[in-house]
Image (cartoon, rainbow, N blue to C red):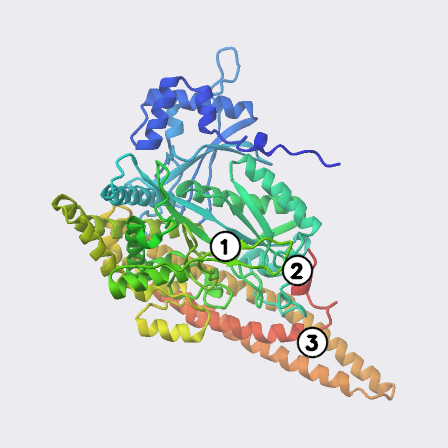
Amino acid sequence: MSEVLNVEEIFASKVFTLGKMRERLPKNVYKEVKRVMDYGGELSLATADVVAKAMKDWAIENGATHYTHWFQPLTGITAEKHDAFVSHPDEDGKMIMEFSGKELIKGEPDASSFPSGGLRATFEARGYTAWDITSPAFLKEDATGVILCIPTAFCSYKGEALDKKTPLLRSMEALSQQALRIVRLFGNEQATKVVASVGSEQEYFLVDREKYLKREDLIFAGRTLFGAPAPKGQELEDHYFGTIRERIGSFMKDLNIELWKLGVTAKTQHNEVAPAQHELAPIYETANIAVDHNQLVMETMKKIACRHGMHCLLNEKPFAGVNGSGKHNNWSLGTDDGVNMLDPGDTPNENIQFLLVLACILKAVDTHADLLRQSASDVGNDHRLGANEAPPAIISVFLGEQLEDVVKQLVETGEAAHLIEGGKLATGVSTLPDLDKDATDRNRTSPFAFTGNKFEFRMVGSSDSIASPNTTLNAIVAEAFCEAADLLEPEKETGNFDLAVHDLIKEYLTKHQRIIFNGNGYSEEWVEEAARRGLPNIKSMVDAVETLTTEKSIRLFEKFGIFTKAELESREEVLYETYSKTINIEALTMIDMARKQILPAVIKYTKSLADTVIAVKEAGADASVQEQLLKEVSAKLAEVKVALMVLEEKVKKASGIESQKELAFFFKDEIREAMSGLRTPVDELEMLVDKEIWPMPTYGDLIFEV
């Protein structure tokens, strides 16, 4: 019988929670910490020393020997430098374990070797990490021991943001300030802030580790660069929500336990559409904690998979021809006195505050569709978006039948007099109850869908940090709220508020209704319709990068202090460079695999076929089948050699391009085409060559034998 697991007991056991602070800190110190968490400000150094000692004592009691400032540079993953708690021994030679408030608040990692897009020169090494007091410290335990991790922001010596967290925190403050102006218009004087909450679903693949280690492309690129389809894929739709296999279930159990200890509210787990694909979803949290936790989810998935003899693949498209992976970013807004600003209530047509918030969000998404698209773009996502398995690259908003009808009434007549009701769903079975039916269906093809009391941004890639999408969402909505409040606050003073808010809602909905689309986002008809509406269709990461530095974007981000122009330009440079480096690694990996594995294996096979032809003929039998196969394989082998030379030549040419933007577009337009040209004959050869000779595990081996 398995051991009974007490989730309540283990949850957040590795986290220095508010509860632990309350137990361990003097009342006045705890109050100061809580005040800074809630309202901002700085801790006094004396208070920081007390907090640091309590945190250190708790960590040491739990086996920690080191601490680290845990931060999120522009690599998209996390970084950490471990320092031991040890200090100089005392006069008796006894080791003293120390950790000061200064060490808690500020760290100094080398800033020269992280991506900075020109903000830091190689010789300019100094950078700072600053404690994010709103995200709790936690303990990581692995082969290095137990490490106290302190979530921090990361900036340069001159104060520029070099990370994902700093702009996110800035955007959260901007959104809170502007959203408060909206709720104040409707008489809420109790709320002191508005919090952006996020729940990020995480899709992933699991493959056997021994097979993974035999695939150079999976090791270096995180996805298969060659691979013919298996006889069976996902066409029977039997994997989605199917029974979880024992080996996967054991992994999921250990993953949940580890995440619960880290305070991650892992709630839902299931098989996803593709074979070997799965999903985990947490409960909503404050945006910056959700970002930190999603990074922990990805790290922990990889760690736990190793323990189970598997490898976790987070690339958006690890296997061609089957479903890719994303993470649906569920975003909502709530006041600190418990009001969800995206809750339409029972009568959304009469809920004026909700209708204003909705109108502002539609305005924000329509105005900055290009920026929102950019925030979800990465190299792997280019293989997924618009491929009938994820939302299209065109940004649109799904509202559902009920809200779309409300919008239509407001645009056409100026008021919404009636409401589409959900009604009852009759099952037709006497022993089953009739069900209350929602007033609208869901739409899995929509990139930005309203789902009851939140918006689901479905475009984000599975390997990507969710910091950028949420920074952008917060920023564009803050701008829309600000502009609405600027117009409505004077009307509040004159007594014309009711008419002014009514007119503004109608104006915004009328002007921005083109962004609303409830139909099939996968259809060609929608692509044509979106073009008629004037909606942008940005098809690749490289095409999206320049949206960061348009006058419109710079004005938005500088207005709310989220990014400076220099910080935006640096990110543009980093993204171009990241794209080029990633595709270059993939191209070099293909070349290496083709030269050292595939060509030798196929040549070996052709020799075997040739020997067989000679032997059969000498025996006086018909060797036409063997001869035909030998001709087919030899022809494809020649195609591979030509395609390989083309790719090698283009990679060589790329080394002479100095402009990062020009280089990125060269990799997109030239190198990727050459990579596709090499893959096609190799995949065709895989279908012809003896499986015992083929030099690597096939798709069937990888996704069906886990």
Secondary structure, mark 1, is: loop
Number of marks drawn: 3
Residue 364 percent across, percent down from the top left: 29, 56
Residue type at the position of mark 3: Leu
| Residue 226 image position (x, y, % from top left) | 59, 67
Q: Which residue is mark 3?
A: 688
Q: State which quadrant residue 250 falls in.
A: top right
Of label 1 and label 2, which has the lower sequence position?
A: 1
Q: Amino acid at mark 2?
A: Leu
Position of residue 522 relative to residue 348, above or below, is: below
- The residue shown at (52%, 10%) is 92
Residue position for label 2: 702
User: Quick one: label 2, few (<14), some, or many (20+) residues within 10 Å?
Assistant: many
The mark lying in front, picked from 1 and 2, is 1
* Res 462 label: 1
Tell me the quarter of the image containing the C terminus: bottom right
Q: For label 3, count other residues whose C-alpha is less than 10 Å away and answer few (under 14), some (14-19) or many (20+).
A: some
Q: Give coordinates of residue 303: x percent, y percent.
A: 59, 44
